[in-house]
Image (spheres, helix red, strand yellow):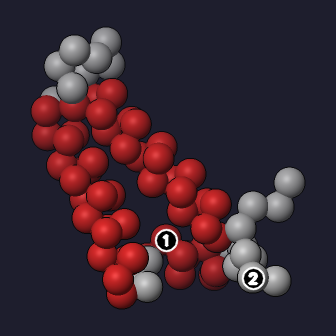
Amino acid sequence: MNLTINQFVRIFAGAFVLISLALGVEASPLFVSKHFLWLTAFVGLNLFQSGFTRICPLENILRKFGVKDGSG
């Protein structure tokens, strides 16, 4: 299975949000600190800005590792 950059970005963002919620919400059995919720905010803000600016640090990193864009 060959994943595209878009798929990797969505997978990474989703994983970081779920992990940070698991570590930051007091009702979670994995709770560590409420400060992990800042990671959720950072991921959301980065996704929001990249929608407008088309600048995504993870995309640049993935391109350097040879991951293909979805267009070709």
Q: Which residue is mark 1?
A: 58
Q: Badge 1 local density, few (<14 within 10 Å), some, or many (20+)?
A: some
User: Which residue is farthest left?
Assistant: 34
Amino acid under disc 2: Ser
Judged from the image, the secondary structure of the residue bearing numbered disc 1 is: helix
User: Label 2 crowding class (10 Å Cα cut-off): few <14, some 14-19, many 20+?
Assistant: few
Q: Nearer the viewer, mark 2 or mark 1?
A: 2
**Residue 42 found in image quarter:** bottom left
Q: Within the image, what quadrant is residue 56 found in? A: bottom left
Q: Residue at x 22, y 53 (%)?
A: 41
Name the residue beneath numbered marker 2. Answer: 71
- Which residue: 26% across, 64% down? 45
Q: Earlier in the sequence, mark 2 or mark 1?
A: 1
On residue 41, the disc is none
**Image quarter (top left, top right, bottom left or bottom right) of the C terminus:** bottom right
Q: Is residue 50 rendered to the left or right of residue 3? A: left
Q: Secondary structure at mark 2?
A: loop
Rounded to the nearest whole Å, what is the CA distance between mark 2 and mark 1? Answer: 17 Å
Question: Split into 4 quadrants, where in the image is the N terminus?
Answer: bottom right
Work out whether 62 lies above or below 40. Answer: below
Which of the 4 quarters of the picture holds residue 61? bottom right
31 vs 12: above or below: above
Locate residue 1 relative to residue 30 in the image: left or right: right
